Amino acid sequence: MKQGRTISGCMAALLLGGCAQYGAGAEIGAAPEPTLCAIELIVLGAGQDAGAPQIGNPQDPAWADPALRLTPTSIALVDHLDGHRYLFEATPRITQQMNLLDTLAPGTGDGLGLSGVFLTHAHIGHYAGLIYLGREAAGASDVPVYAMPRMADYLRSNGPWGQLVDLENIRITALEDRTPQALSSTIRVTPYRVPHRDEYSETVGFVIETGSKSALFIPDIDSWDEWEADFDLRLEDLLEQVDFAFIDATFYDDHELPGRDMTLIPHPRVAATMERLENQPTDIRSRVQFIHYNHTNPVRFTDSEETQGVYERGFHIARAGDRHCLDVRRERR
Ligand SMILES: [Zn+2]
Ligand SMILES: [Zn+2]
């Protein structure tokens, strides 16, 4: 049964182009050797918790142009060989984001086709979408939800989340800081605590590893320096260890919120993170994928001066629909 699903999952992805788009050039004269992406990350949303346009912002150009709309940050991990799909974050726009995932990498199982949901923390953009797994919407059955201990307790003991547990729409697995969670023989996910305002839960980032490549996911953090001071972890060290780094880009700089003293608002600014990393080799800088941008952040627009500047300095900006292969397999015809 599992073997059958394995083949159909990857073949479906190949037919849809999902597995095949990462092909390197074939050798001249050699038989074509299709490249399959066995495990990939798909960006489902790259905005801050409230996305864009936001409530009470009738001037936002995204009201008139749906192409400018942002959903909150979420990425999917898709194992095409085993037919497993995992979400990182359950955002308030999970309905649209699951539809994007179903379009790019259709599920192979029953129901939602979700093998798990990893949560970073209890701020609305990161977990509130769990409500759509409940009886009023998907009526999901036993979807594994991976969360840190305080976050797990918060979900179990507060409505409406507790009802999802009681009705077995979700099944919570408590994670431990810096302890890998094995999802298969090749995939593991490790949470790392980060400094953030932790009213209801801890906040973590994740390192996602496959047999060949890895990714760092830190959508929310107060400061890279505090991370080093409080948790003894340096952004530069993590960047050396991973192939992709989806990191907090909430604000571009300190001029973004007119009338507000932004020195009082945490989050590393995109401009400051780029300055911090400017002496890193090109290869290291190119691993950065800025994500979780606020509706006020000019990098949300693909044609802004700031977006162009980010690319000129060797960094990237994550966009919904981006796909990154974490494990390539080649198969002869
Ligand atoms: Zn957030
Ligand atoms: Zn947050």
Image: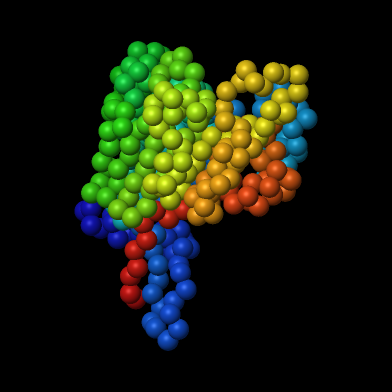
Between residue 241 and residue 207, name the one nearer to us. 241
The correct choice, above or below, for 246 with respect to 126 in the image is below
Q: Name the colour scheme.
A: rainbow
Asked if one can make out residue 22 in the rendered structure from this viewpoint, the answer is yes
Between residue 313 and residue 138, name the one nearer to us. 313
Q: Specify the quadrant that holds the C terminus.
A: bottom left
Residue 145's x, y, as percent? 34, 30
The correct choice, above or below, for 230 with respect to 4 in the image is above
The correct choice, above or below, for 328 with respect to 127 in the image is below
Residue 137's x, y, as percent? 45, 29
Q: Residue furthest right?
A: 59
Residue 287's x, y, as percent? 50, 49
Q: Residue furthest front?
A: 279
Q: Is residue 65 left or right of residue 329?
A: right
**Residue at (52, 52) in percent of width and height:** 281
**Residue at (44, 76) in percent of width and height:** 26
